[in-house]
Amino acid sequence: MTGAQSSTGGSVGTGCLLGCLCQIGFFVLAMAGAIAMNNQTSKLVYLSWGVTQWIALIPLIQSQRAKGHNATVQGLLIMGSIGVLLSSACAAMMLTRFVVSRSAGVK
């Protein structure tokens, strides 16, 4: 048994891969929905991605936990956490740019 391999199956790497694929799929669906809705929600989806990604990840985490694949669950949680951090960084950059452009226009 290796360090990343669980005795009941699954691995952290498998969880990271599943999490990444799940997030990409959910992102594509969210963007398709935003485009279909006339791009009104596209900025909201980008800004709230850290929260909305869990809609896709939580059922997958519950499924893997029920199967006893604890290492896979850890990988999924790692990917979810990375997603939250990246989303927060992107939101901070977008909001900073918005605030700076607003304050530059008001004198």
Image: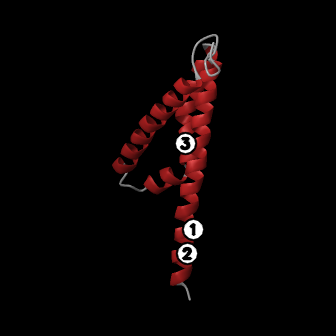
- Residue 84 drawn above or below residue 94: above
Labelled pair 2, 1 in contact (Cβ < 8 Å): yes
Residue 39 occupies which quadrant of the picture? Answer: bottom left
Q: Position of residue 76 (x, y in %)?
A: 58, 30
Q: Position of residue 104 (x, y in %)?
A: 53, 82
Residue situated in front as seen by the camera: 57 or 9: 9
Labelled pair 3, 1 in contact (Cβ < 8 Å): no
* Side of 77 relative to 36 (left or right): right
Residue 12's label in the rendered image is none
* Side of 31 relative to 3 (left or right): left
- Residue 71 drawn above or below residue 98: above
User: Extreme top residue here?
Assistant: 8
Q: What is the image's colouring?
A: secondary structure
Q: Dot 2 corresponds to which residue?
A: 100
Q: Dot 1 corresponds to which residue?
A: 96
Labelled pair 3, 2 in contact (Cβ < 8 Å): no
Query: The N terminus lies in which quarter of the figure?
Result: top right
The amino acid marked with disc number 3 is Thr
Residue 83 occupies which quadrant of the picture? Answer: top right
Q: Dot 3 corresponds to which residue?
A: 52
